[in-house]
Image (cartoon, rainbow, N blue to C red):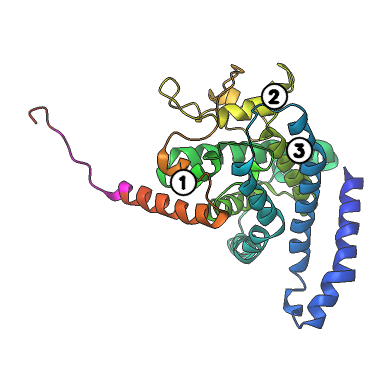
Amino acid sequence: MQGLVDTWVDVQSWILETAVHPLLFRFGYMTFFEDAPFVVETLMLGVVQIAVILLVFRPLERLAPAERWPDRKLARVDIVYTLLSKLGILPFVVFVVLYPVNDWLQDLVREQDMVLPTVEQTIPWLRDKPLLLFATYFLLYDCAGYWLHRMQHAFPWWWALHSLHHSQRQVTCWSDDRNHLLDDLLASVYFAVVALLIGVQPGQYVALLLLSRLIESMSHANVRFGFGRVIDKLVVDPWFHRTHHARASAAEPHIHDSNFGAVLPVWDLLFGTAVYDYKRRPTGVDTPDADADNGKSWLGQQIAVFGRLGRAILATFRPRRVVHPAE
C-alpha cells in the first residue's frame, strides 16, 4: 500500500514540477502554488478511473450485457458526465468551494481547542498497523456513504436532485457520475467533513477514493453477471446495484429504496434494505418529469433538475388541506 502511495506522490510531484508550476509562474498565478497539488491529484484520479472504464468495464459490457438496446443514444450523455466530473467542471467546483470549507473547519477546530474523535486517537494501536487503519477508514467512509444515499432518497428536495442519477434508462459503467452539480457539491462537502472527523490522511484518502469510485463504476456496469452468492454479500456487484436502479412499478413501488450501499452491502444487510432476488428489471424512474431527462443534453438535464428542485421546495411549505369526513 505504501509503495503505491509513494509512486502516486512521485508522479504528482513530476507533473507539478514539469508542467503546473512553470505555467503558474509564466502567467502570474503563483498565488495558487500551494493549492495546485489538490487539483493535480483530482485530475490524476480521474485519468486512472477513465482508463479502467475504457480498458476493463466497457469490454465486459460488450461481452456479456445485462440489457441489449437497439442503440446507446441515451447512455452517451453519461460519458459527458464522466469526463466533466473527473477531468473538468467538478474538480474545479470542489476546488473553489470545498477548499475554503475545509480550511474553515480546520480553523474552527484549532480555535475551539476541539478534540476530534479521529480513528488514531480512539484506537491508538492502529497507528502501527497501516492496513488495518486503512480498512477502518474505508469502513467508516462507506458507512457514511450509505447514510448519505439514504438521505438523498428520503428528503423530497434532495430526491429532486438525485432523481437525475436514477432517470437513466440505459445504466452503464459511465452512469456513476450522472449527477447534478449541486448534488455532487453537497456530497463532496459531506465527505470532507467525515474525512476531517475521522482523521483520514491525504495519501490514504486518495487510495480510499480511487478504490471506492472504481467499484462504484463497476457496480453500474451493464453486465449480466455478479460476483456469486457469497462474494456479493461482501462487495456490491452489478446485480445488487442494478436492483437499486430498477424502475418502480405498481407491484414494487419502492424497489429503488433498497441496496443503498456503494461498496459494501453489509450496511443494507444490517439495516434491512438489502434485496437479493436476482430478478431482471428495467432501469429508470416511473415519474414522467424525471423520465423526461432521457434524450436531453447535459445542460438540459441540469436545468430540468432545478425545476424539480423548486417544485419540491415549494411543496414542502405549501399548506396541506385537511379533508373532513363530512366533505
Circle 1 SS class:
helix
Give the magenta-colored segment's residue range.
315-323
Q: How many marks?
A: 3
Pick out the residue farthest to the left: 326
Could you say where residue 157 lies in the image, as x and y percent from the top left?
42, 47
Q: Are marks 3 and 2 in contact (CB under 8 Å)?
A: no
Q: Which residue is mark 2?
A: 224
Q: Quadrant of the N terminus?
A: top right
Q: Depth check: give the residue in front, 43 or 72.
A: 72
Q: Which mark is residue 158?
A: 1
Q: Is residue 317 magenta?
A: yes
Q: Quadrant of the C terminus?
A: top left
Can the viewer see residue 116? no
Q: CA distance from mark 1 to mark 3?
A: 30 Å
How crowded is the residue under tag 1: few (<14 C-alpha within 10 Å), some, or many (20+)? some
> Principal SS element in the magenta part?
loop
65 up-or-down from 315: above or below: above
Could you say where residue 297 lies in the image, as x and y percent from the top left?
55, 53
Circle 3 SS class:
helix
Could you say where residue 155 lies in the image, as x and y percent from the top left?
43, 42
First-in-chain label (2 vs 1): 1
Q: Which residue is mark 3?
A: 58
First-in-chain label (3 vs 2): 3
Quarter of the rendering containing residue 223 = top right
First-in-chain label (1 vs 3): 3
Q: Report the mark closest to the observer, 2 or 1.
A: 2
Q: Report the mark closest to the observer, 1 or 3.
A: 3
The three-letter amino acid code for the residue at tag 2 is Arg
92 up-or-down from 54: above or below: below
Q: Is residue 1 magenta?
A: no
Q: CA distance from mark 3 to mark 2?
A: 13 Å
